Amino acid sequence: MQFTKMQGLGNDFIVVEASSWEEAGKYQDLAKVLCDRNFGIGADGLIIVGKDSNMDIFMRIFNSDGSEPEMCGNGIRCVARYAYENKLVDKNALSVKTLAGPRYPEVILQDGHLQAVRVDMGEPVLKRELIPMSGQGGNIEVALQAAGQDFLLTAVSMGNPHCIIFVDDIDSVPINIWGPHIEKHELFPAKTNVEFVQVLGEHEMIMRVWERGAGVTLACGTGACATLVAAVLNHKSERKAAIHLLGGDLEVEWSAENNHVYMTGPAIEVFQGFIQRDKLFDI
């Protein structure tokens, strides 16, 4: 099986081609072993990509625990670069089928070299029941108790659920303790990604993430988009900002014209390789 290892701001993925959306589902059982950093290739997630009959390409992603999220912002940038450089598409702007619906990345070139990928992430979902979040009321400044702490959260979906918590000092957050408790809190029936955010100014903030199904990662693209939306809703930020993550920076903008969120950042190929499934798996 041929694979390509890619990363977006240190959020790393194993990318494999498949002939159809249905065939891609067969890889779910392999995700945990392939993503294992000691006994497999090692990654935060396994991405399956291929040509689609209705859109340019499809993308399915399986987390390192084997679960399937609806979307992945860093992952879709990697997919766009992979599709462009491996001739799955012959244009800079492409359409991608995902579980969260269609997404539209654009490869940005400078002097013929790929510099970054800008993705139209669509409109944020703010209705409580659609995020999804249980209970009645709104999605802003919702009280939550977890890990012996009281939190105020803002919930946003970018096709996948996010719980954003603003803090005064990002370095004081015990993310490995708080993150898993909030991820699995009964308030979130589909579990949730958890972002802790320190706002530095109207156009700048620091974000740390506990990803649903993966734990602490160096970056989360959908989380950065949800973070900007939450900051605007809480009057902490303008509609365009730099989001500083452990793996680097993303530029995120929430357009007032069409309500879409746009994310721009890098996507890097690390290496290519082959793996013999019969030697790695007891199948």
Image: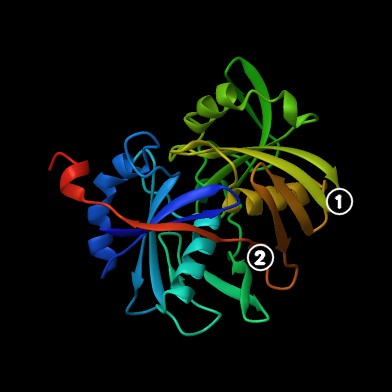
Instruction: Residue at 60%, 68% (x, y): give it.
Output: 117
Tag of residue 104: none
Q: How dense is the environment of label 2, judged by Cα within 10 Å: few (below 14), some, or many (20 and up)? A: many
Find out whether the residues at labels 1 and 2 contact each other: C-beta distance under 8 Å: no
| Residue identified by numbered label 2 | 262
The extreme bottom residue here reads: 90
Query: Is residue 15 or residue 59 the one in the foreground?
Result: 15
**Residue 21 placement (x, y as % from top left):** 29, 65
Query: Is residue 272 or residue 115 the one in the foreground?
Result: 272
Point out the tag, 1 or 2, that comes first from the N-terminus. Answer: 1
**Residue 182 placement (x, y as % from top left):** 54, 29
**Residue 191 placement (x, y as % from top left):** 46, 37
Q: Which amino acid type is marked by label 1?
A: Glu
Q: Is residue 157 visible to the viewer in this orientation of the structure? A: no
Give the side of residue 221 with respect to residue 17, left or right: right
Q: Secondary structure at mark 2?
A: strand
Q: Is residue 187 visible to the viewer in this orientation of the structure? A: yes
Q: CA distance from mark 1 to mark 2?
A: 17 Å
| Residue identified by numbered label 1 | 202
Q: Is residue 245 above or below residue 175?
A: below
Q: Is residue 163 above or below residue 8?
A: above
Q: Which amino acid type is marked by label 2?
A: Tyr
Give the side of residue 76 with respect to residue 120, left or right: left
The tally of labels here is 2
The extreme left residue here reads: 283
Q: Quadrant of residue 51?
A: bottom left
Q: Secondary structure at mark 1?
A: loop
Say which quadrant the C terminus sits in: top left
